[in-house]
Image (spheres, helix red, strand yellow):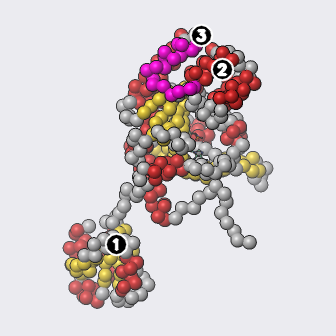
Amino acid sequence: MKIGKIKGFRDHYPEDMEIRNSIFNRMTSTAENFGYKRIDFPSLELLDMYRLKSGSELVNQTFSFTDRGGRDVTLIPEATPSTVRLLTSRKDLPRPIRWYSFPKVWRYEEPQEGRFREHYQFNSDLFGIDSQEADAEVVGLASKILDTLGLSGVYEININDRSVMEYILKDLDVSDINTAFSIIDKYRKIDKNSFFKLFKEIDVGEKSIDKITYLLSEKINIKNLEKKLRKTLNNYDGIEDRINRIKRTFEIINYYTDSNINYDFSVVRGLSYYTGIVFEAFDIQGELRAILGGGRYNNLSTLFSDEEIPAVGFAIGDAVIELLLKRNNLWLNNSLKTSYYICSTTNNYDYPVKIANDIRNKNKIALVDITNRKLSAQVKSASLYNYAIVIGDNEIKDNSITIKNMNNSEQKTIKYVQFMDSL
Ligand code: HAM
């Protein structure tokens, strides 16, 4: 029997990892420019962390098992509960707190375009403030990261608010709010009849279902939010303050990005812990799964402590980002360093090793060919690098190097000091 790879898992070869690293670095350095600091946590956590607040959909997708000590544990399916666990065990940290992380996470989903059973997930979260400024900063950071990757104009962000949705549902006499959220979450994935039927099953009247469908039917400009709600709700006044906060949030987001930001009642998010703003980014053509998702979750901290700590954040998976960057010819290594491949025609490696170390000290790439092969074979290997440096008896004697530009084959012999000065 030949042993293969597990379904839904990916391997990454060096040519892929180089680009991946350069893209991941741009994401993390954007978060750092916003003052976010990196954290990390274990890949294995107690299953209860997700049972109570993330919701059954996610728990059903976990790679979980009972460990040798009889504990129900799981490979982490998301980073948010671990992040909050770290937060609640450090009461000494001055707030607000801005953290990011970049773990691998695991979900037993059906593998498809942009979805795997293991993916890298970039997370950013802001703790300690419940305000429109905090909400806008986090959405702003999400869009800034996509813009930094060159994706301006390629994506849009759709925003809703869970507390607004809860108000609407109650106003329309829906009593089973949690089930209603899970039906709304399916709105764009199922046909109209099934959607209608699911709401009927939780005793929602036809008039109310019509109104819900009317709200969900299209993404709208924030300018039309109030008008649309006044038209739909029996009592608008009770939600007025919240709507004003959302309008202000949209205004502030405009300072961060020129991208399309829509109000979209159909965004409620699959995870149960969200309490306020919720948002997702999609490619503008609507062909791919969500690029990122997030929102405000003010009471997840009560899983670990008595204190409710305001929190808002988001996560970007690497899979849809990769598809989108490839489609737009942006899957590139933008942090290429000049590289030198040092060939030697003598058995004396003292000089080549010294040159390589001097080049590395200038933060450039250097390799020494240590094969003792014919020079032509060594120079062939050098074709993967920017320059070949050839060292023979003459170069050792004269303290010089022969350097060949592998792009245009230009070759010259120069003094070593002169070469080092040019780096
Ligand atoms: P989520 O929407 O479940 O949110 O996942 C966030 C992103 O992770 C998705 O938009 C998608 O890009 C990526 N993703 C999710 N599942 C897969 C998969 N099977 N394969 C590839 N990519 C995937 C969360 O996980 C929240 N914890 C985000 C958050 C942070 N909320 C607040 N802070």
- Identify residue for label 3: 234
- Identify residue for label 1: 340
| C-alpha span from label 2 to label 3 | 14 Å
Q: What amino acid does circle 2 point to?
A: Ile
| C-alpha span from label 2 to label 1 | 67 Å
Q: Pick whichever, 14 or 391, lies toward us.
A: 14
User: Is residue 184 found left or right of 324 in the rendered image?
Assistant: right
> Quarter for ligand 1?
top right
Region rendered in magenta = 216-234
Q: Estimate how packed mark 2 is, as few (under 14), some (14 to 19) or many (20 or more) residues with alpha carbons within 10 Å.
A: some
Q: What amino acid does circle 3 point to?
A: Asn
143 w.r.t. 393: above or below:
above
Q: Pick whichever, 333 or 222, lies toward us.
A: 222
Residue 209: which disc?
2
| C-alpha span from label 1 to label 3 | 72 Å
User: Is residue 154 found left or right of 204 in the rendered image?
Assistant: left
Dot 3: what SS? Answer: loop
| Badge 3 residue CB within 8 Å of ligand 1 | no
Tell me the chief SS of the magenta region. Answer: helix
Which residue is drawn at the image coordinates 48% and 61% (left, top)?
16
Dot 1: what SS? Answer: strand
Mark 2 / mark 1, whichever is N-terminal: 2
Q: What amino acid does circle 1 point to?
A: Tyr
318 w.r.t. 378: above or below:
above
Q: Is residue 223 magenta?
A: yes
Q: Position of residue 187 (x, y in %)?
A: 62, 31
